[in-house]
Image: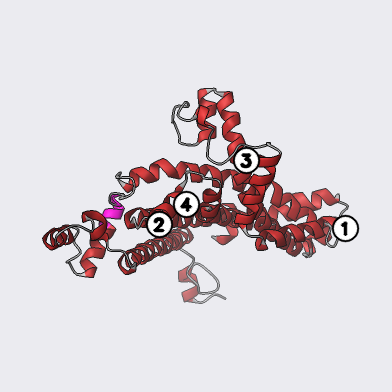
Amino acid sequence: MSSAADLNTGTGRGKTPPEPGGHRAAATRRKARRIGGVLLSLLLTMLGLLLVTFVIGRVMPIDPVLKVVGDRATQAQYDAAYQAMGLDRPLYVQFAGYVGEVLTGDFGRSISTGQMVIDDIRRVFPATLELATLGTLIGVFAGVPLGVIAAARRGGIVDQVARVVALVGYSMPIFWLGLMGLLIFYGILGWVGGPGRQGIIYDGMVPKVTGLLLVDTLVAGDWGAFKDAFSHIILPASLLGYFSLAYISRMTRSFMLEQLSAEYITTARVKGLSESAVIWRHAFRNISIPLVTVIALSFGSLLEGSVLTEIIFSWPGLGQYITKALLAGDMNAVLGGTVVVGTSFVALNLLSDILYRVLDPRSE
């Protein structure tokens, strides 16, 4: 028989049933804590990035005051500029002011161009974005199938080729490959356009809509300009795509090998499913979620690591802009470009984390 306490609770075990909506409230609290943790992590990462760039700007052996007033300025002019730039204030006050300026998009004025740094970045960043995007697409559409086939035929010819491709991609200097590519495909064979983003004949002829030249030429319906722009971007994009391919194919192969050794794959084969269905419908579906993170990291690496490629191919992007600014001692431009690259990388990591949670309900 049930005790009085059991009867009062309405159960035979003396336990209070969960209140209506209790599970939903708990799930909401967990989700709120998770979102709060992500936002806090994002905030701390951005503060760390700003702190690093602020410190770099202070420890570099470049006097920003002399860059403004010149070497022939008097001491009074130097002191006035020093105070006007706020360099006489305590460092924590300078850092607070720096954070406030960055949040409003104010990176100061570039000494090299005479323009506001944010305006320069708006002008050059689309070129880097276009180059990195095309390079990532090449890496994904070539690297993913290569990694899948290499894992499915482990030890075979395709697997050996994939290993060699990855090894060369990791070990070969990018500047050497760039120079050899220009020599062979542009200088000797004439298959691609030369350095730069567009030929002189088309320079300034296409209205700027997005800043992405391939997109703008299509919007304008200028097929001649599109072909010219494509001929200039395909070689540096293929070079970046090759390095992206090496990383993506290696990670895809690793993920696939882990899945192909799982018990559910053996069960699927025992049930009589075709090998292509086992590989693409089951194994590949399970690795598609971690591949999102791999592709996002690869894209971020191309955004921040295309400096040498842009220099070799005279590509007017953010990497070349930062390099020229560094050589000229233009710290406003250097720090502004560094903050933009770092912010892009943080945003891509956040986006990959969000997509991971959306695509994989088990992460909730």
Relative to residue 193, is residue 316 drawn left or right?
Answer: left
Q: Residues within 10 Å of mark 3 (few under 14, many from 20)?
A: some
Label annotation for residue 327? 2
What's under tag 2, amino acid-wise? Answer: Leu
How far apart are labels 2 and 1 at the CA level? 64 Å
Mark 3 highlights which residue? 234
Mark 1 highlights which residue? 270
Are discs 4 and 1 less than 8 Å apart at CB? no
**Residue 101 is one of the magenta-drawn residues:** yes
Is 291 located above or below residue 5 in the figure? above
How far apart are labels 2 and 4 at the CA level? 13 Å
Q: Tag 3, which secondary structure?
A: helix
Mark 4 highlights which residue? 319
How far apart are labels 1 and 3 at the CA level? 45 Å
Q: Residues within 10 Å of mark 4 (few under 14, many from 20)?
A: many
Residue drawn 50% across the image and 57% down it = 349
- Of the numbered discs 2 and 1, the one sitting upstream in the chain is 1
What's under tag 3, amino acid-wise? Answer: Ile
- Of the numbered discs 4 and 1, the one sitting upstream in the chain is 1
Q: Tag 2, which secondary structure?
A: helix
What percent of the width, then of the height, locates residue 118?
34, 46
Q: What stretch is highlighted in magenta?
A: 100-107
**Can residue 357 be spotted in the picture?**
no
Are discs 2 and 4 less than 8 Å apart at CB? no
